[in-house]
Image (spheres, rainbow, N blue to C red):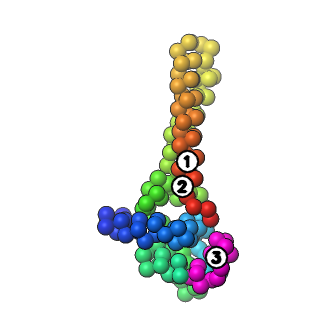
Amino acid sequence: MLMHSESKDLDKEVAGEYNTFRVYILMLKVKKSSARHVQVALGFSSPYLATHHLEKLMRLGLVKKDSYGDYHAIPQSFGILRLFMVTGRWIVPRSIFIVVIFAVMAIGFLIYLQQHTLFAVAFILSALGLVYSLYETIQFYRLLPET
């Protein structure tokens, strides 16, 4: 767990630096990479630029380098990444759980819609909740830089 001052440093040093943040997001997705792979994946002009960002992430404790020269991601939650979960190769907004809950409710109320008029009201409310939470989840996902 990060201390408050360490989190502020990461917010400034990584989340505030667009390309460094892009490199970290890529590393979270691929877990292990070389500087050359980062350069190609993110369209950097040279491997040196990728190495610069990877070394910066290493100094901050967000990646480590093995004896073969490959970098490995160390997942941390800071900046806008607090709104996301890293699961395997996916970085998913935490609000996806609200989408799932409203979807299950809407489907359930739709199935029992003809049994009682209150189910119609419950269906409408859960469908509105589903649409709104899906919209917010998409907006969160758009916060992440392209990798």
What residue is shown at x 50% (from left), y 54% (from top)?
A: 84
Majority secondary structure of magenta residues: helix
Residue 147 or 88: which is nearer the viewer? 147
Where 101 falls versus 70 (above or below)? above
SS of the residue at dot 2? helix
Residue 99, horizontal then vertical, whole percent: 55, 39
User: Is disc 2 surrounded by few (<14), some (14 to 19) or many (20+) residues within 10 Å?
Assistant: few
* Residue that mark 1 sits on: 139
Which kind of residue does numbered mark 2 sit on? Leu
For residue 98, say whether it is visible: yes
Dot 1: element:
helix
The residue labelled by disc 2 is 143
Q: Position of residue 35 (x, y in %)?
A: 61, 80
Bounds of the magenta segment: 37-51
Q: Earlier in the sequence, mark 3 or mark 2?
A: 3
At 53% from the left and 22% from the top, the residue drawn is 122
What is the crowding at mark 3: few (fewer than 14 residues within 10 Å), some, or many (at least 20)?
A: some
CA separation, marks 1 and 2?
7 Å
- Quickly name the residue at label 3: 44
> Could you say which is closer to the camera, residue 115 or residue 4?
4
